[in-house]
Structure formats: structure tokens, C-alpha cells
Image (tube, rainbow, N blue to C red):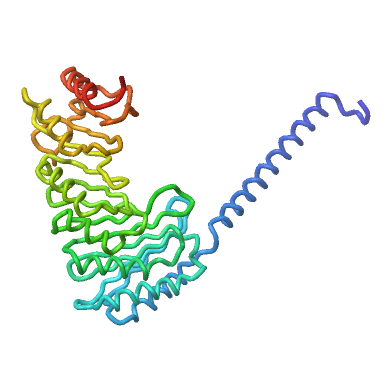
């Protein structure tokens, strides 16, 4: 070889040089990646979040403000203000606090999930905004109006991001009013808006109602007549497109179980109803754990099933399900 360098030594030098360049390149990529990722998270705004908390603390009617700020890869970006109002604070004072939060966050926190929790005497009003739409004052006004119309421990509005297909959600916890009175109150306040109402009634039945919900008085009276007697056995009621679209009940087993389940289906069904889902399970306590080996499903008036092929049910449940599907679905 020229210069007295052996081919083996030259090959060793080339390999070492290649390894060195690869290591340097890897370090550069790692550094660039780390810097890039840090840049993607944006500058920290914890100081600004604290400043906003101080502004809110000075508002009339405010007793205490807790500021929670997060900006990390695992936690994501969010700001939360938990505001305890003084006893007797007015609705106007609470709305003014929410309006101040809208104004103070401005554009700086547009990429942050924002949450406001107003702790009032005996209840909590919570607003979560993933849309960066400055909704706090508007939502607080509606929720506080609802709170004055009904006895409920907690009202929560969750505004979905425009980048998702999820609906906005209004969730009511432990309402003391009749469930149909609760639905009427929500419809009177927010009936033209598009969102999902979720509420657990006094009978521990979970309700999911898709709004706008425009049931006329006669139609709602029929729904009340159908549902009210079976509420003690009902786990969940889903209303969509102004009709029951899902019903889940737990009933005791017995020789007349087929006729009892048929009675429930026929109470709820109507000649002009779109296809809807009826779920049931066997048991003595609808508020307890569900025995999924006894759970069956019928698409009443339709033939669409998305069932888990690995789900195991008892032979008696399979027989019962086959009987009800023969009577009520259209898969024939």
C-alpha cells in the first residue's frame, strides 16, 4: 500500500472513522430532537398563570383562588382555576369572574386546555374548554341559571376540541329533581344547542340525552308513562334524535322472564320509532355489578350488531336472546 499503510490498517481506520461520524451524527440528531421537542411545547407561562390568578382573587365575591398549571410531555398543557366564592356571592359576581378569565387568558393560552371550577354554597359549577373559544362567561351564565332552577350538587360543561368528533357534554351529578323535570329545565335553557346531556337520576339510572331535544308535550308524556314504572330496574336510558335509542335493564330471573322483557320492549317501542337497542341482564340489583354472562341484546326494528366474538354468555341467555331477536329484530 502507498505510504506503508497496510490494507488491514487502512480498513480499520475507515471503520473507526465511520463509527465516529455515526456517533457524532447521532448526538447531533439527539440534540436537535430535544431542542425541537422543547420548542414544540412552547415557552412556559406559569408566571402569567399566577398573575391571572391574582387578578381573579381581586374580584368581588371571591374568597380563594387555586391555580394549577401544567406544561409537559406527559401532562399536556392546561391551566385550571379553582375559585371558592364567598357565601351569598351573586350570580353576576360569578359570571364576572368567568368573564375576567376569558379576557386575561387572551391568545397566550390558545393551545392550552382551560378549566374553571366555581365552588358555590352547596354546589360546584365546572367548565372545561378544549376549543380555545373564550366560553367561560357564556357557559357560566347558562349553568348558574340552571343551578337556580334545580337542586343539583354539580354541573359540568365540557367543550370539545374542534379537532375531534366528540360532542360537547353537560353532566349533572346527584340531581334531586324528577328526571323529566331536569330534562325540561335543560331544554328550556340550552334546548337549541347541540350537546350530550348526561345525568344520573334519583333511582341511579344513567341518562344520556342528545340535544337539541325537541320532544313535544304529548310525546314526552308517552315517554314518561313508558319509562317511569321501569326506572327501578333500569341501568341506562339513551335518547337520540328525539326517541329512545338505547335501554339497559336488570331483571330477576324466573319462568316469566321472557314475558317481562317483552313487556318492557313494548312499553318503550312505538310504531314510528327508528331501530333502537335493548340490553338486559339477569340479577336482583340494577345498581350492583352486572353479570355479563347473563347479558343479552336486541336491535329492535333493525339488524345491526357489533358484538364481541369472545364474549361468553350462558346457554339460557343465548336461548332468551334468540327468542327476543326472532320477535323484534329484522334479521330474517
Q: Residue at x 14, y 58 (%)?
A: 177
Locate residue 300, reporting x and y percent: 25, 31
Residue 49's spot in the image, x, y percent?
43, 70
Q: Position of residue 241 (x, y in %)?
A: 32, 46
Q: Which residue corresponds to the image point at 28% horizontal and 65% vertical from the top-left?
A: 143
Instruction: Pick out the residue farthest to the right.
Output: 2
Position of residue 163 measured from the top left corner of the image (x, y, whole percent): 49, 51
Figure check: 310 above or below 114: above
Q: Does 121 sit left or right of 165 as displayed?
A: left
- For this rendering, which residue is in front, 300 or 280? 300
Residue 182, by quadrant, is bottom left
Decide which of 53, 218 is in the foreground and name it: 218
Extreme residue toward the left, this view: 255
The relative height of residue 150 versus residue 201 in the rendered view (above or below) is below
| Residue drawn where x is 75% and y is 31% of the image | 15
The number of numbered discs placed on residues in the rendered structure image is 0
Q: Is residue 237 left or right of residue 138?
A: left
Q: Quadrant of residue 231?
A: top left
- Report the front residue among 75 and 293: 293
Q: Nearer the viewer, residue 60 or 99?
A: 99
Residue at horizontal 16%, vertical 63%? 151
Q: Quadrant of the C terminus?
A: top left
| The N terminus: image quadrant | top right
Amino acid at each position: 500500500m502507498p505510504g506503508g499503510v497496510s490494507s488491514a490498517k487502512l480498513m480499520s481506520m475507515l471503520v473507526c472513522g465511520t463509527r465516529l461520524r455515526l456517533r457524532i451524527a447521532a448526538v447531533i440528531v439527539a440534540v436537535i430532537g430535544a431542542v425541537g421537542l422543547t420548542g414544540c411545547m412552547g415557552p412556559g407561562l406559569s408566571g402569567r398563570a399566577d398573575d391571572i390568578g391574582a387578578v381573579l382573587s381581586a374580584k368581588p365575591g371571591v374568597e380563594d383562588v387555586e391555580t394549577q398549571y401544567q406544561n409537559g410531555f406527559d401532562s399536556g398543557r392546561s391551566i385550571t382555576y379553582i375559585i371558592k366564592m364567598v357565601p351569598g356571592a351573586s350570580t353576576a359576581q360569578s359570571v364576572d369572574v368567568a368573564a375576567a378569565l376569558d379576557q386575561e387568558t387572551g391568545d397566550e393560552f390558545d393551545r392550552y386546555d382551560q378549566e374553571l371550577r366555581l365552588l358555590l354554597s352547596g354546589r360546584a359549577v365546572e367548565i372545561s374548554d378544549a376549543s380555545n373559544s373564550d366560553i367561560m362567561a357564556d357557559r357560566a351564565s347558562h349553568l348558574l341559571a340552571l343551578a337556580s332552577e334545580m337542586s343539583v350538587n354539580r354541573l359540568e360543561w365540557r367543550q370539545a376540541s374542534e379537532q375531534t368528533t366528540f360532542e360537547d357534554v353537560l353532566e349533572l351529578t346527584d340531581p334531586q329533581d324528577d328526571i323529566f323535570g331536569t330534562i325540561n329545565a335543560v331544554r328550556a335553557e340550552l334546548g337549541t344547542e347541540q350537546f350530550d346531556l348526561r345525568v344520573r337520576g334519583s333511582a341511579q339510572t344513567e341518562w344520556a340525552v342528545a340535544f337539541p331535544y325537541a320532544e313535544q308535550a304529548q310525546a314526552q308524556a308517552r315517554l314518561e308513562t313508558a319509562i317511569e314504572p321501569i326506572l327501578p330496574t333500569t341501568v341506562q336510558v339513551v335518547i337520540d334524535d328525539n326517541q329512545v335509542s338505547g335501554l339497559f335493564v336488570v331483571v330477576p330471573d324466573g319462568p316469566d322472564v321472557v314475558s317481562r322483557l317483552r313487556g318492557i320492549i313494548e312499553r318503550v317501542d312505538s310504531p314510528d320509532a327508528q331501530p333502537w337497542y335493548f340490553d338486559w341482564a339477569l340479577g336482583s340489583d340494577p345498581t350492583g355489578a352486572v353479570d355479563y354472562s347473563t347479558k343479552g341484546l336486541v336491535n329492535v326494528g333493525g339488524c345491526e350488531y357489533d358484538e364481541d366474538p369472545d364474549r361468553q354468555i350462558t346457554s339460557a341467555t343465548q336461548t332468551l336472546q334468540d327468542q327476543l331477536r326472532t320477535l323484534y329484530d329484522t334479521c330474517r
